[in-house]
Image (cartoon, rainbow, N blue to C red):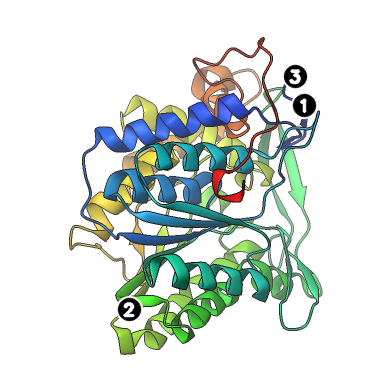
Amino acid sequence: MIIEPRVRGFICLTSHPKGCEQNVINQIEYVKSKGKIEGAKKVLVIGASTGFGLASRITSAFGSDAATIGVFFDKPSSPGRPGSPGYYNTAAFEKHAHAEGLYAKSINGDAFSNEIKTQTINLIKEDLGQIDLVIYSLASPVRTHPETGKRFKSVLKPIGEVFSNKTVDFHTGKVSEVTINPAEGDDVENTVTVMGGEDWKMWMDALKEADALSEGATTIAYSYIGPEVTKPVYRNGTIGAAKDHLEATAFTITDHLKSIGGKAYVSVNKALVTQASSAIPVIPLYISLLYKTMKEKGIHEGCIEQIQRLYSERLFDGDLALDDKGRIRIDDWEMREDVQAEVVKLWETASTENLPEIGDLEGYSNDFYNLFGFKVDGVNYDAEVDEMVEIPSEA
């Protein structure tokens, strides 16, 4: 079939297998171009199929020759219906990992569930014995609690007061004012339950209990802080409360891993176009201005550049460069004073008319379509493509 993008708001309802594969190939080639990393050799990535999780799996495998197990929740293809981009990404990753003799297996299911935790641990014990590095990169809006069966839904809201500021429709380029009402009722608690650190700790507890972690094992979860302009709706809002909980959980997990010399860290990453960030008002305009500024300064990074630098310059070179709250800061280039000062200046004048000049809305839009395998250089989108792709380890 010929697959074209069908977009509804901040979601693309279709994805392109060849485009997704080319995206994966591009990331693999970037990691290889940067040389070998003396890193972990047995890696579990929870949330492994897109964004920072996929970049972590690629960097582990093709940077450190690591055996990887990836856990994710994605839709397979069916006749006449493309699979989700994460499914195609994983199929491509495994194909190229296996071609280079690398161990790579995947588990597709609800990572919040006890069943998937047990299935993953059984696979680790059977094939790898123990894991050296656990990457936790889940980004789900809902969670069914494994103990109670109750379904929780996260919300993106400020806390305490109404938030109003500029945003942009990245499809049309129209800059407008957005107003978001504050959290109410159980909004904060529900968001923390979905996006906080409880599930990360459950994974680490289960892995340790099963003796599936090697001596000195490390685990990393990903977070975001961001600038002053997004703080009311993001870091000081409901999602920020969840990130605070996630970051505090790192210390709890480290205490629990003391007997094996293990450590848990949170890495604060850069603002990038992801399926999750596309849904957050204000963020697309901020990222558009940020991209323009960082590209002009020659310090722009995508997911793979961020994670390759995290691995090569922080995790495995002996200098984590932790901040005063014990976090790894790989958002250091984004948060540079000169970068933020420029973004603030541009923000004040940003309008529908001048955004094409002062921002990089085209870069934002291209990155959005790339997430789903579209607008990727070197792919012929006019050609028929087989939507029926299988993940090798599931075939």
| Foreground pick, 5 / 175 | 5
The image quadrant of residue 211 is bottom left
Residue indicated by mark 1: 6
Task: Please tell me which residue is depicted at 38% across the width and 76% down the height of the picture.
Answer: 213
Q: Is residue 61 visible?
A: yes
Image spot of residue 317 (x, y percent): 18, 57
Chain-order first, disc 3 or disc 1: 3
Q: From this view, report whether residue 46 is shown above or below residue 249.
A: above
**Three-letter amino acid code at disc 3?**
Met
**Nearest-to-viewer mark from 3 and 2:** 3
Mark 3 vs mark 1, foreground winner is: 3
Judge the density around disc 3: few (<14), some (14-19), many (≥20) Cα neighbours within 10 Å: some
Residue visible at 66% across and 11% down in the picture? 383
Label 1, residues with CA under 10 Å away: few <14, some 14-19, many ≥20: few
Q: Secondary structure at mark 1?
A: loop
Identify the residue position indicated by label 2 in the image.
Answer: 262
Q: Is residue 83 above or below residue 37?
A: above
Residue sticking out furthest to the left: 318
Compute the Cα span from label 2 to label 1.
45 Å
* Residue depicted at x 26% and y 32%: 33
Q: Is residue 370 left or right of residue 25?
A: right
Q: CA distance from mark 3 to mark 2?
A: 49 Å
**Horizontal and vertical percent position of residue 51:** 52, 45
Mark identifier at residue 1: 3
Q: Which mark is residue 362?
A: none
In this rendering, is residue 386 above or below 239?
above
- Please name whichever residue, 212 or 295, is drawn nearer the observer in this view of the structure: 212
Earlier along the polypeptide chain: callout 2 or callout 1?
A: 1
- Residue type (three-letter) at the residue carrying disc 2: Gly
